Amino acid sequence: MKEKFYITTAIAYSSRKPHIGNTYEVIMTDAIARYKRKQGYDVFFLTGTDEHGQKIENCAKEAGITPKEYVDGVAGQIKDIWDLMGASYDHFIRTTDDYHEAAVQAIFRKLYDKGDIYKSEYEGWYCEPCEAFLTDTQAVDGKCPDCGREVKRMKEESYFFRMSAYQERLMQYIEDHPEFIEPEARKKEMVNNFLKPGLQDLCVSRSSFKWGVPVSFDDKHVIYVWIDALSNYITALGYNPELPASEAFAKNWPADVHIIGKDIMRFHTIYWPIILMALDLPLPKKVFGHPWLNVGADKMSKSRGNSIYADDLADVIGVDAVREYVLAEMPYLNDGSITFENIIARYNMDLANNLGNLVNRTLAMTTKYFGGIVPSPTQSQEIDNDLLATVEKTYAAYVSEMDAYRLADAVETVFGLFRRANKYIDETTPWTLAKNGETERLGTVLYHLLETIRVGTVLLEPFMPATSKSILAQLGTTCDAYAFGGLAAGQPIGKAEVLFSRLDEKDAMEKLTAMNAPKEPVIPKPADCEAEIAFDHFMGVELRSAQVIACEPIPKAKKLLKLQLDLGYEKRQVASGIAKCYKPEDLIGKKVILVANLKPAVLCGVESNGMILASGEGDSIRVVFLDDKTPLGERIR
């Protein structure tokens, strides 16, 4: 009986089409699943879509359709891209599936009846794009630390999960299972930044929107993402606490590994394990957090206008080339990078020059010198033994790297073998052997080349499945054994075909740029822009540098602070509406820009002689500060 291996991606959020950075995860997971199948495991590969939440409700409203109609379209688009990329998943779950929603309601009810969930009220910061609640320290400068967008202050009735009750138990589990969170740096981040400072109870329902799984005993609430989305890993196997255990759940749980992005490590290594502990279920054996794929050095996002999509790339370079690029360019820990220049360079170097040229030359020589029949190896020399040793070392390194999820290293190892085979051609010069009539030696050389290509192709399959299949067909074999010697002498090779034609750099760049060129986001002109003014008109505004020497609140004026300013040649008093964003002690000693020739005014009984410059409004005001070295009273033009 085969040993089971249960592997999952994070489920993709169905608000927008996934870019290549999102798609990397399913390609990586697919490569691991294919490798494990080849190693003899009974693999169950799960992926799917997360389809509830306020963001989707708003997207559907903007589109003028129902939320279900909206997610049906986006989920279909996600599934199409996963299929295009060759993802060999065993099940595709949608959180709108009836069985999932019923199981989530049962899970919520069980946790509530157990006393782990209670009703209270939430007040704090909320990031709608990330659908995340934030503490005052997390919401830096009124923005989400993950996506950088503005957060909103909100207050609503919610149900909460008693995270704090399981904190010590989770910390002990992580200590006892050092392999649970990888890479190691991610584990340290979770423990030091989130667990050790102490866990707050988790908001697990929402009452301010309706698009979600209803709480079965309180229809004012929908179950929030933490329980809804995370539970997919068990509901997809048929888990429901109110039903007998399914055969699939009994066989496959716990998961052997969750493959997720580094940005959702906290949810999968703290929230999810604690939910499982509360359900009295085993924890997944491993959570692996992969880095991001950036555009150059910038984070990829739709709002930045620099998103690149897998299906668009595949139209230019092909599916397997897309797979090879993202797997090769994503390091184990640090972020990877995608640029059009690198895509072209890697395609020409790895695929056209190295792999494609090797296969083409070897098959052409086999046809030319042996009529397309695999020759017998009869005159092995030290150089042949060296090549065989390289094949063995390559396989050992490849297994070690794949088992550790170091896929970029594994890709490099395989292509290193192909480079060694190309070098072997240069070392043995088969054309010279043919010219000199050294037929037996020539047959030995070509057999070693053909077999090295075959073994390398078998290793390549998890990364480039269609290419691997094509090469084996050209070799005229179905043998997918790792051991050297699987190609039978005397059998005919298949029909040779061009694998990868070298890209013309200029033409490829034009196609890639036309496809989806990284560009600056288009920023619309603000609606409150004023009419153009003449230069003389602007110069009539006297702006001068000043230093805040004293500052205090103005009684009965919640928005105003009273500032005493030093201009060097005189002192001024100014009332400024910045009290919601600054404390008096934050301003004392700072140098600011003063509109010095503004007509005096009285605000809440305080005379104000000027105005300091600031951007924004309401709760997002930002005072413009000057360099400490700026002289007092200096004219600003």
Image (cartoon, rainbow, N blue to C red):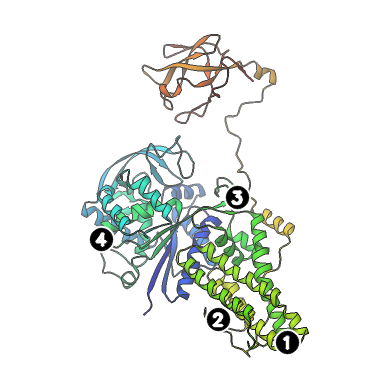
Residue 56 percent coordinates (x, y): 45, 50
Q: Is residue 3 left or right of residue 320?
A: left
Q: Which mark is drawn over residue 296? A: 3
User: Label 1 neighbourhood size at 10 Å, few (<14), some (14-19), many (20+)?
Assistant: few
Cα separation, mark 1 vs mark 3, equals 52 Å
The amino acid pointed to by label 2 is: Phe
- Upstream in sequence: badge 2 or badge 1: 1
Q: Which is nearer the N-term, disc 4 or disc 2? A: 4
Q: What amino acid is found at the position of numbered circle 4 in the picture?
A: Asp
The residue that mark 2 highlights is 484
Quadrant for the N terminus in the image: bottom left
- Given the current orientation, which residue lies at the most extreme right position? 435
Secondary structure beneath label 3: loop
User: What label sits on residue 276 in the rendered view?
Assistant: none
For the C terminus, the image quarter is top right
Point out which mark residue 280 bears: 4
Q: Position of residue 483 (x, y in %)?
A: 52, 80
| Mark found first going from the N terminus, 1 or 3 | 3
* C-alpha distance separating marks 2 and 1: 24 Å
Seen as rendered, the residue at the extreme bottom is 490
For the residue pair 263 and 49, the one nearer the viewer reads as 263
CA separation, marks 1 and 4? 71 Å
